[in-house]
Image (spheres, helix red, strand yellow):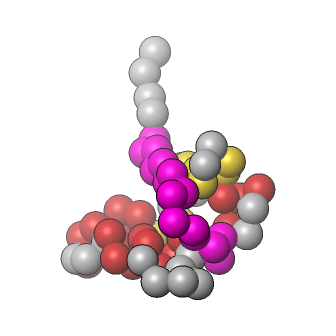
Amino acid sequence: MESGTNVQDLLNLLCDSPAKRERMFEGQGLKPYLAILKNGKHISNLDGLETKLDDGDLISIFPPAGGG
């Protein structure tokens, strides 16, 4: 990705169809049950969707988990 890329840019690249976008986003933000980590830190503790990405960053996207 280009210099200055952020988490929002990455998600826009990954969500290349309306169906994928609908599963990830709610309005202008993420669905509340999704957890996205940059190098093990939740993006809500960083700059949210504006969190900058650098070469070598590890991005983890966790869907909702359930069970019992």
Write the residue at 60% across / 54% down.
Answer: 38
Find out whether residue 65 is within the magenta segment.
no
- Residue 50 placed where, x, y %? 65, 76
Find out whether residue 54 is within the magenta segment.
yes
Write the residue at 31% across / 72% down.
Answer: 15
Confirm whether residue 28 shows in the render.
Answer: no
The N terminus: image quadrant: bottom left
For residue 12, what is the image quadrant?
bottom left
For residue 66, what is the image quadrant?
top left
> Camera-side residue: 18 or 4?
4
Q: On screen, 12 above or below 22? A: below
Write the residue at 65% across / 70% down.
Answer: 51
- Given the current orientation, which residue lies at the most extreme top position? 68
- Residue 34 placed where, x, y %? 51, 52
Q: In this view, does 17 lie to the left or right of 64?
A: left
- Residue 6 placed where, x, y %? 56, 76
Q: On screen, 15 above or below 57? A: below
> Camera-side residue: 27 or 15?
15
Write the residue at 66% across / 58% down.
Answer: 43
What's the magenta region?
49-64
Confirm whether residue 6 shows in the render.
Answer: yes
- Given the current orientation, which residue lies at the most extreme right position? 45
- Numbered disc total: 0
Per the picture, the main secondary structure of the magenta-coloured stretch is loop
- Residue 30 placed where, x, y %? 53, 66
